[in-house]
Image (spheres, grey):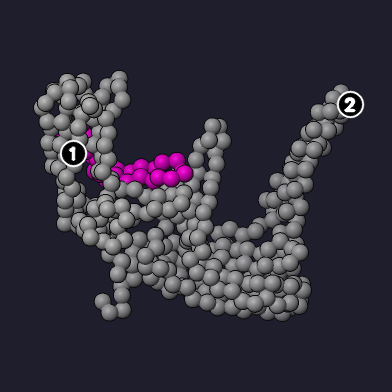
Amino acid sequence: MSKVDIQFHLEGKGIEEKDPNNLFSAPIYRPNTEIRGNVLVYPNEDLRCRKVVVEVLWHTAGRGTRFQQSVMEEVISEGNLMRGVPISADFSTVLPHEPWSFNGRYVSIVWGVKVKVDIPMGRDVELQKNFILAPVRE
Amino acid sequence: MDNPKPTRSTGSRWFILFGSFFVLIALVAIRATADDEPVTAVIIGIVFGLTGLFFAIAGIRQWYTRYRVGKPEVQISKQTAVLGDNISISFHNTFNREVNVETFSIKLIFKETATYQQGTNTKTVHHEEIIDEYNTVGQRFSAGSFLSESHEFTLPRDAMHSVDVRRNQLKWFIRFEMDIPRMMNFQDDYEITVLPELTSREWD
């Protein structure tokens, strides 16, 4: 059992899941639309913790050194976590116009919502749920 | 119509300079060590000398191709475009010397470039995708003869825009290429900045 269970729920005005080009079955958001969601962090044990952060970000993936940029960062909890006491938080932000999601041979652009449980002197617990940022093409 | 300068051309100057520098290092090192350590001198001579010669010869061959072909005049309708845009291109060249061009092509290229660290080395990899291509049948051009070609490309609406961040690039290019037997090929690339926007559809 992991130290912490993390669950996401994404919604928002821009969300569209029935795009025929969506091969990854990830939710699709349109540029300049709002992404909203809820995060549930459920500690399975008492944990020393600095903070719990929710981030909406994009990063490069593939062969190149990773480049990352955050468009929203919100601390949803500060201090230690207690076993069985969940932390739930809503978040929202307006997504930027670019860069659009892309899957290339050496360079990919990946968008996601990340929750990070910052553990001092230990390995942080992280979970990222990816989504697609793309315009309507037709 | 813009009259741009090539982003990357088969420029010979750096190859010749780089090659000459290596050859010079080889000569100096051989001279300094030849009396005391002849084996070292031979190794340095082979490694640096051959590397230098390789680059210098490549540079000279490139220079020779450009000398014979001449300096083309290129016009590109848009150097900043959006997806779905049409880009008109024209290429005019007067040949300095006789050149046998096997094929002349204009290509619309989408290029991925990724740079990464491997140990102490920094490595860069490229992947090019030819999105569209226009080819003409080759012909023998005599000195003073004229090659003039025009074409129009459309940036696909379902493609990706340009991205340039640290160590990761997605770029668009127009490439002019001449396949010349027994000589280095002629190649000039012109970058097109593709913005993250789409042209409005005609019926919108």
Image-based side of B175 in relation to B99, left or right: left
What kind of element bears circle 2?
loop
Quadrant housing residue B12: bottom right
| Residue picked out by circle 2 | B35
Residue A32 x, y percent position in the rendering: 24, 57
Residue type for callout 1: Gln
Kindly give the residue lying farthest to the right in the view shown: B35
Crowd around label 1: few <14 · some 14–19 · many ≥20 (10 Å): some
Give me the C-alpha separation between circle 1 and circle 2.
74 Å
Please check the rendered image and state whether residue A55 is part of the magenta-colored stretch, yes or no.
yes
Residue visible at 48% across and 53% down?
A: B112
Residue visible at 78% across and 43% down?
A: B50
Residue visible at 66% across and 64% down?
A: B186
Label at residue A7 = 1
Q: Compared with residue B142, is residue B19 higher up or lower down, i.e. above or below?
A: above
Kindly give the residue lying farthest to the left in the view shown: A85
Kindly give the residue lying farthest to the front in the view shown: A1
Question: Which residues make up the magenta segment?
Answer: A52-76
Image-based side of B196 in relation to A11, left or right: right
Residue type for callout 2: Asp
Q: Is residue B1 visible?
A: no
